[in-house]
Structures are given as structure tokens and as C-alpha cells.
Amino acid sequence: MASEAVTDRGEPWRLSALSMMNMEVDIINVLSAIRVPVLVLHRTGDPICKVEEGRYVAERIPGVRSVELPGEDHIPWVGDSDSILREIETFATQTW
């Protein structure tokens, strides 16, 4: 999934660098300071980031809109991307 997206659009080493960066970043302590509209989308069967991790993040952001969608894909444009686009459109039109 993710590796295919990177190799189709760039160099494979970028996936490794991005993965390492994402594992080292810890933003938990600043989530409660967010004061802008936030949409957290998570697929319930995501094998890379467990749905509990999405819930954990969402619980720490004031006024967050959190949506759990069925599916096992981690990348938004893989699998049922229509449901993700609908949620983004709904969020954007209701927020602004």
C-alpha cells in the first residue's frame, strides 16, 4: 500500500525517512492547545495506526470532530475514498 504509493511517485528511501520522522514526533502535549477546527478520520481496521490511537488523539483536541469509517486501508486515497471525501466535504461545509 504505502510503499507502492511512494515507489510510483518518488524514491523508495523517502518512505523510510517519512516513517522514521513520524515515529519520532510526539505532539500529545500540544493537542489540547489546538484552537482551530479539526477533523480526525480513522478507518477501524487500519493495520498501521490502530483505531484506539485515533481515539486517543481525538480525545485530547477541544471541539474535534472524530469519524471512524469501516475499512483496513491506512492511506486515504486507497479503498473507499468516497466516504473519506464525503466526510471532508461535510466537515468543511459545516465548519466554514
Image: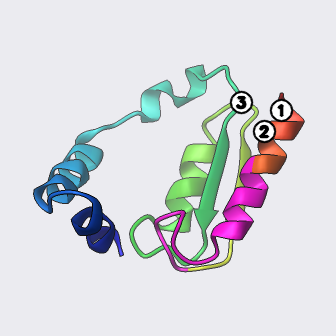
Residue at (55% x, 55% y) in the render: 54
Give the residue number, with chain letter if any, for mark 3.
37
Residue 92: which disc? 2
Quarter of the figure that contains the C terminus: top right
Which region is colored magenta?
72-88
> Label 3 vs label 2: CA separation?
9 Å
Is 18 left or right of 41, judged from the image as shown? Answer: left
Image vertical order of residue 58 relative to residue 77, above or below: above
Instruction: Say which label, 1 or 3, has the lower sequence index.
Output: 3
List the single residue furthest toward the right. Answer: 94
Mark with earlier residue (3, 2) = 3
Residue at numbered disc 1:
95
Q: Residues within 10 Å of mark 2 (few under 14, many from 20)?
A: few
At 29% from the left and 38% from the top, the residue drawn is 25
Quarter of image, res 86: bottom right
Image-based side of 4 in relation to 43, left or right? left
Q: Residue at x 71, y 68 (%)?
A: 82
Say which amino acid is labelled 2: Ala
